[in-house]
């Protein structure tokens, strides 16, 4: 039986424990998509996690959907991420940058070039997008041509190289939550009739191409991928989820990536099929799991690492708190997206609380 606090191998890394900080959008970069010293402090505070996976980071200008999200394609963005990775490594941590192209989940007001969003097909998603002028309907995207799909794959490859140049230990491909890669997987966002649409085999093609290109660029042992089977978020309909993801995971397994990161939405049979088919590390994220269940998947051998979001956001020293059986901070939802250090770097640690009590006694 493994425990959360046992070391584990992930790709070319030996991690100190089996707790991963899940990627969480926080909207606190510069308008140019450059990470700041505040971002560096936030991630460095959480360096005791076995692995930090950063917020979604656009691989190109077309990949941006939300305001104040970071990018990883320009020299300035590389320099900003170097400040972050240096801080995390100095604190003893390991960090992967998540590459997130939002596809149709965007608005021209939120991008540096003000262009129409791109997607597999010209299908407008339901819902609204927050912009600097308030909530607006998301517009109909422009369908990518075959030539543009190839260019987008190159954008992912370039971003992965930039991430390594910035000092990241690896990258995670965001193929979940209704963004571009999952849009290609879906039946309602992807209406193509060429080699990227129609059959399940065709719909997984883009995801596999992106993963293969990144693995070729930086090595499979520094490449992970994040999926969310059955998740309808951002107006996604997948059809036969089991067939779709069995096909996808089988093709990805042949690349021997560093890990597969699964947002588990209830299909335990499918998750066990992933466990049997996947040759390297498996990360499992169960959103909303209670504290007492954090270790269940790891101890049962179903996961190699447990991925945690809100607990990690509110508890920079979550590893220490779990080891000590200490109480957890409550997350302030009003500060999740955008703002300053409040609700970002000011959550207390056990040590800061102890020091505060000592000073009060003095």
Image: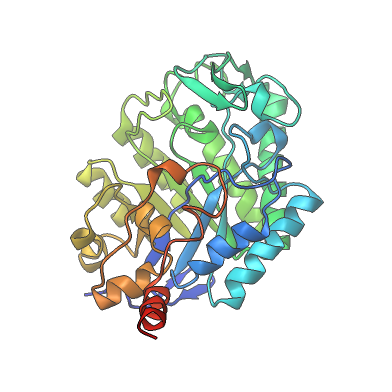
Q: Position of residue 319 (x, y in %)?
A: 36, 71
Residue 221 visible in the current orientation: no
Color style of the picture: rainbow
Placement of 258 over or under 361, stated as above or below = above
Horizontally, residue 273 falls left or right of residue 86, namely left
Residue 338 visible in the current orientation: yes
In the orientation shown, which residue stands out farthest toward the bottom? 362
Q: Where is residue 324 in the image (x, y as percent from the top left)?
A: 27, 77
Horizontally, residue 186 falls left or right of residue 323, namely right
Which residue shows up at 35% across the image and 75% down it?
A: 320
**In the depicted view, which residue is nearer to us: 162 or 39?**
39
Q: Position of residue 257 (x, y in %)?
A: 50, 57
Q: Quadrant of the C terminus?
A: bottom left
Query: Which quadrant holds residue 266?
Result: top left
Which residue shows up at 31% across the image and 27% down it?
A: 240
Placement of 172 over or under 167, stated as above or below = above
Q: Where is residue 354 in the image (x, y as percent from the top left)?
A: 36, 79
Which residue shows up at 62% across the image and 58% down it?
A: 38
Which residue shows up at 37% across the image and 23% down it?
A: 237
Query: Which quadrant holds residue 302?
Result: bottom left
Horizontally, residue 129 falls left or right of residue 168, namely left
Q: In which quarter of the image is the N terminus?
A: bottom left
Count of number-bearing discs: 0
Placement of 266 over or under 357, stated as above or below = above
């Amino acid at each position: 039986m493994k425990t959360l606090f046992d070391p584990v191998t992930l790709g070319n890394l030996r991690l100190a424990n089996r707790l991963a900080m899940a990627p969480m959008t926080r909207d606190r970069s510069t308008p140019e998509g450059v990470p700041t010293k505040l971002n560096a402090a936030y991630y460095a505070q959480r360096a005791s996690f076995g692995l930090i996976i950063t917020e979604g980071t656009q691989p190109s200008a077309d990949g941006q959907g939300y305001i104040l999200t970071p990018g990883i394609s320009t020299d300035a963005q590389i320099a900003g991420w170097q400040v972050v990775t240096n801080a995390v490594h100095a604190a003893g941590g390991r960090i992967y940058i998540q590459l997130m192209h939002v596809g149709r989940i965007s608005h021209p007001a939120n991008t540096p070039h003000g262009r129409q969003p791109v997607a597999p097909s010209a299908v407008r998603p339901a819902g609204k997008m927050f912009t600097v002028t308030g909530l607006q309907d998301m517009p109909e995207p422009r369908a990518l041509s075959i030539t543009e799909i190839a260019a987008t794959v190159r954008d992912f490859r370039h971003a992965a190289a930039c991430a390594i140049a910035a000092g990241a230990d690896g990258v995670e491909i965001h193929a979940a939550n209704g963004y571009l890669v999952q849009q290609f997987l879906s039946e309602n966002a992807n209406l193509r009739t060429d080699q990227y649409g129609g059959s399940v085999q065709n719909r997984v093609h883009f995801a596999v191409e992106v993963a293969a290109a990144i693995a070729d660029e930086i090595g499979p042992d520094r490449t992970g991928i994040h999926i969310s089977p059955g998740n309808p978020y951002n107006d996604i309909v997948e059809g036969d989820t089991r067939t779709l993801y069995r096909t996808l995971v089988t093709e990805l397994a042949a690349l021997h990536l560093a890990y597969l990161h699964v947002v588990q939405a209830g299909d335990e049979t499918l998750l066990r099929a992933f466990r049997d088919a996947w040759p390297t590390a498996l990360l499992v994220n169960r959103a909303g799991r209670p504290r007492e269940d954090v270790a269940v998947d790891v101890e049962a051998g179903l996961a190699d690492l447990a991925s945690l979001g809100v607990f990690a956001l509110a508890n920079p020293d979550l590893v220490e708190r779990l080891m000590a059986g200490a109480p957890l901070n409550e997350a302030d939802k009003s500060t999740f997206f955008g703002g300053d250090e409040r609700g970002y770097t000011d959550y207390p640690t056990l040590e800061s609380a102890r020091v505060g009590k000592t000073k009060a006694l003095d």
